[in-house]
Image: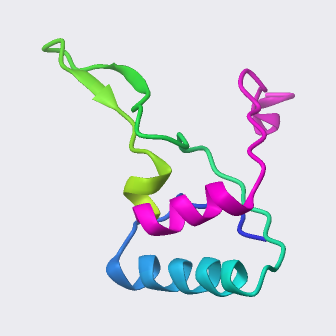
Amino acid sequence: MLDDLGAHRATEWVEDVIHGIIGHRYNHQKTIIATTNLADDDDQIREGSTPGGQPINRKTLGQIIGERSASRLHEMCRVIKLWGVPDYRWKGR
């Protein structure tokens, strides 16, 4: 289980470790569950704009963990998108 994949700063070491985990499970046809808030393709999602009007774009999963790892995840996983689901942490505040 890789929870909140891509949420941490993607150093070269982090990218290597993630690729090692995904690559091992891919090569041995093992199950993997991954959750992320990042877009799953090359289409960047706009989060708004700067005061000067320049768009602010979120990075995609492939940009954070590497295109090889993202490609393997897409091949071995079924993507379930949960758009519009409220953040449970904000309930009751």
Residue occupying the point 79% across, 64% down: 33
Outermost residue toward the left? 52
Residue occupying the point 78% across, 49% down: 78
x and y percentages locating residue 73 in the rendered image: 63, 62
Residue occupying the point 40% across, 37% down: 58
Q: Nearer the viewer, residue 52 or 83?
A: 83
Task: Classify 91 as above or below 11.
Answer: above
Quarter of the image that includes the N terminus: bottom right
Q: Nearer the viewer, residue 81 or 27?
A: 27
Look at the image and say whether residue 47 sits in the magenta stretch: no
Residue occupying the point 79% across, 28% down: 93
x and y percentages locating residue 30 in the rendered image: 82, 80
Can residue 10 be seen at all in this image of the molecule?
yes
Outermost residue toward the top? 53
Tally the numbered discs. Answer: 0
Look at the image and say whether residue 81 sits in the magenta stretch: yes
x and y percentages locating residue 19 in the rendered image: 52, 79
Task: Classify 60 as above or below 52.
Answer: below
Apparent side of residue 90 relative to residue 16 in the rendered image (left or right): right
Can residue 4 be seen at all in this image of the molecule?
no
Apparent side of residue 52 relative to residue 22 in the rendered image (left or right): left
Q: Nearer the viewer, residue 83 or 28?
A: 28
Based on the displayed image, in which of its 4 quarters is residue 37 positioned?
A: top right
- Which stretch appears magenta? 66-93
